[in-house]
Amino acid sequence: MGAVALFVLLTDGNLATPLYAVYRQHFGFSATELTLIFATYTIVLIPSLLLFGQLSDRVGRQPVLVGGLLAGAVGLALLATAKDTAWLFVARAVQGASLGAVVGTAAAALVELHPDGDHERAALATVLAQSGGSAAGPLLAGALAQWAPAPLHLPYIVGIAATLLTALLVAAIREPREPSGEWRLQRPSVPRAERRRFARASLTGASVWAVGSLYLSVIPSYAAKLLDTSDLALLGAISALMLAAACPVQVLGVRGLVSPRTAQPAGLVLLVAGLALLVLAFPAQSLPLVLAAALLGGLGLGLGYFGSQAEINQLAPPERRGEVTAAFITCLYTGVSITVITVGVVSDQLSLRTAVTGASIVIAAVALATTLWHVMDGRRTAVG
């Protein structure tokens, strides 16, 4: 049920993706405000993760999972009843706090609830819940908004029902462990000897998720202009394709068919190829190029995220895994926040096309430099 709770909350957190353009028409906010609304989710998630990361050790996994799901339902209710832009900011903050409280708890509960305590299967469930939930949100909301009534209400009503049902199911399962220990701030920290590997893996993770965040925030608006369409189902499907494409390659990685050392540079190269197609798609006004860009970007996200997370797991000493993981997630979401906010500001000052093109060039440059770093360190290790 930990994976289901994580899947549902990530679906909830991304239901608004294809609807941002509709909100802009209703409330009249700028591109900068749009990206700030999206970034509020990640900005609140980081301190929430650090604050509540070890709360479940003290009070138990089940209460934290149920509390996070109930908070997620409140966030959806705020979105469904939003009267102005301020409501959207508050709703996204509530959603960020709910996911921050649950993400670490769900991962821990998956290991504890597995009969053999299988870390690999638990990791696979966590990875699929994250990518699958992120893909399901825009796909579900886009379809309902396009083909069903009340586009700014029905997706959230469906989400609230699913979230409350999941909370009831989680409340019915047994507590996987006896609460113990202290509740303390889970501070970010990295052992000095591992900081080089940590920095390389973090750059990989931040690069791939920076692109993922663009698909969940401004790419639907970009695609709407590019294709001259207001089809919310299509715009949601483009975002969903990017995140869904990450799932199968992550399965290959977790099952040992792709090594973390190989996955990271391969993912970054695919990411750069996807960004190149995304930039070329605008002058060509080509839907096939947009879809190919989403597919390649998603494959790059899947490989890069799996590889970087696996390397973090390897380098983190068991007694400091929480601190190292907190530092890694902080790096990822900091990169996400900076990327989407910068794109919003540049879009208001110049144009959305210019903003996406500029962001793509910067991310591609970082990705290629990080790829070179991976290759050079790999050769050094092989020679050594």
Image (spheres, helix red, strand yellow):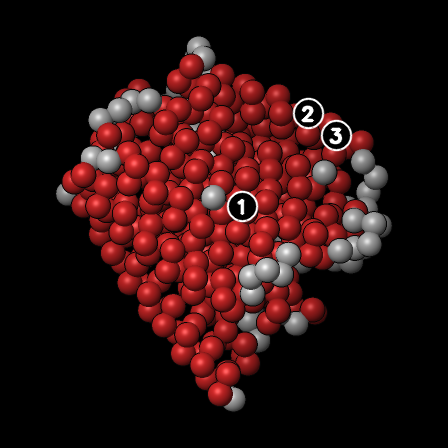
Dot 2 corresponds to which residue?
Answer: 165
Say which residue label 1 marks: 247
Residue drawn at x 57%, y 75% as measured from the top left: 191
Which residue extends farthest top? 149
Image quadrant containing the N terminus: top right
Q: Which residue is mark 3?
A: 169
Q: Is residue 96 above or below residue 75?
A: below
Question: Who comes first in sequence, dot 1 or dot 2?
Answer: 2
User: Which secondary structure lies at badge 2?
Assistant: helix
Using the rendered image of the protein, determine whether residue 57 is visible from the camera's viewpoint. Answer: no
Label 2, label 3: how many angstroms apart (C-alpha)? Answer: 6 Å
Above/below status of 381 relative to 45: below
Give, as a three-letter code, the residue at label 3. Leu
Q: Where is residue 190? Give x, y as percent.
A: 55, 71
**Residue 75 percent coordinates (x, y):** 53, 30
Viewer-nearest residue: 305 or 46: 305
Against 339, residue 78 (above or below) is above
